[in-house]
Amino acid sequence: MEFFAEYIGFLAKTVTLVVAILVVLVTIAALRSKGRQRTGELQVNKLNDFFKQLQQRMEHAVLDKDQLKAVSKAEAKAAKQEKKAAVHKPRVYVLDFDGDIKASATDSLRHEITALLSMATPQDEVVLRLESGGGMVHSYGLASSQLARIRQAGVPLTICIDKVAASGGYMMACIGEKIISAPFAILGSIGVVAQLPNVHRLLKKHDIDFEVLTAGEYKRTLTVFGENTEKGREKFQEDLEATHELFKGFVARYRPQLDIDQIATGEVWLGLTALEKQLVDELKTSDEYLAERAKSAELFHLHYAEKKSLQERVGLAGSIALDRFVLSWLSRLNQQRFW
């Protein structure tokens, strides 16, 4: 027991020292990075090389030497003819959007779109692999506006959905000239929802007053702590309905073939049913579509990676170090008990 107590004391001192050092480093990093504009780097990878490597790996595993020689000869001949004919393949720019409730990926998406629009022509294509269950109205409104830039530039836009594009996710998807969905992806949810708890009765029960002071009749309609009124609820619902109408109008603008009143009920459908309702144009996975396009076009995957600040890097490194230290301590503690 005495050894255990000494060990706990040593551990407490060590953790205190580590935390103190981390606080100092994070504070210094915050002061140094204050006022600096965050920068990032655009990463561009040619996906044709990726598909080619997969094919070559299979060929070397399956074909014998004579067959490999014949395939290599045929490919060299085709490449020579293509070069001689001066064939210029169209370019396909591939983007990814993995949406959270705040559509945080918009920060990278806008830089990627700015970059590709500096070179893309109407003969090229942009493919967005989209995954999102929706989120905040203004956040997804901005993300959708970024995609609209591609349409305005006259560059064909294809949206691929493998898992889900609902609510704000479908708001983005509908901008595509062509929407491709996996058979069991989730689509739709063209509706608006808002919810919040109210603890006014609990506060009242314990004789706790909560004052809400506003200037403007509808500055605050519903509140968490104050007493909500029927008039406030009606105004809140009115705002939701207005947002829903804007949502419906936006979708109808880009997908005029839809019966908007039939599908704007907040329901979701799987890809098979979504095709029947014309929410999508084709059933296919993004892998299948891109593999097909790689045969006749040059595919470039764009990703804008934001550089982490010194504060973030120090914090991340400290978090990892602390996790490892705790795991190491628990491991040793378990060993001590075993002994």
Image (cartoon, helix red, strand yellow):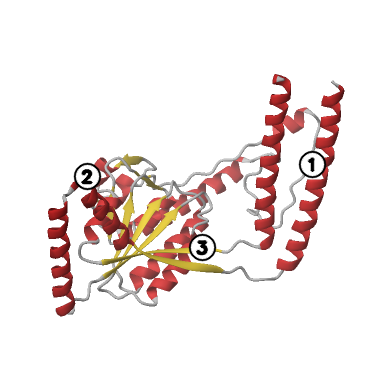
Query: x%, y% of residue 113?
Result: 42, 68
Q: Secondary structure at mark 1?
A: helix
Q: Nearer the viewer, mark 3 or mark 1?
A: 1
Front position in the image: 138 or 88: 88
Residue in the image at 43% along x and 56% along y: 97
Near mark 3 (Cα within 10 A), the count class, few <14, some 14-19 or many ≥20, is: some
Disc 3 to disc 1: CB gap under 8 Å: no
Horizontal side of residue 141 vs 28, given as left or right? left
| Kind of residue at disc 1 | Val
Quadrant containing the C terminus is top right
Is 9 above or below relative to 66? above
Query: x%, y% of residue 94?
Result: 35, 62
Is residue 12 in view from this perspective? yes
Query: x%, y% of residue 106?
Result: 49, 60
| Kind of residue at disc 3 | Ala
Q: Which residue is mark 3?
A: 305
Is 331 above or below relative to 211? above
Q: Which residue is mark 2?
A: 276
Q: Which residue is mark 1?
A: 15
* Sequence order check, earlier mark of 2 and 1: 1
Front position in the image: 16 or 120: 16
Q: Secondary structure at mark 2?
A: helix
Near mark 2 (Cα within 10 A), the count class, few <14, some 14-19 or many ≥20, is: few
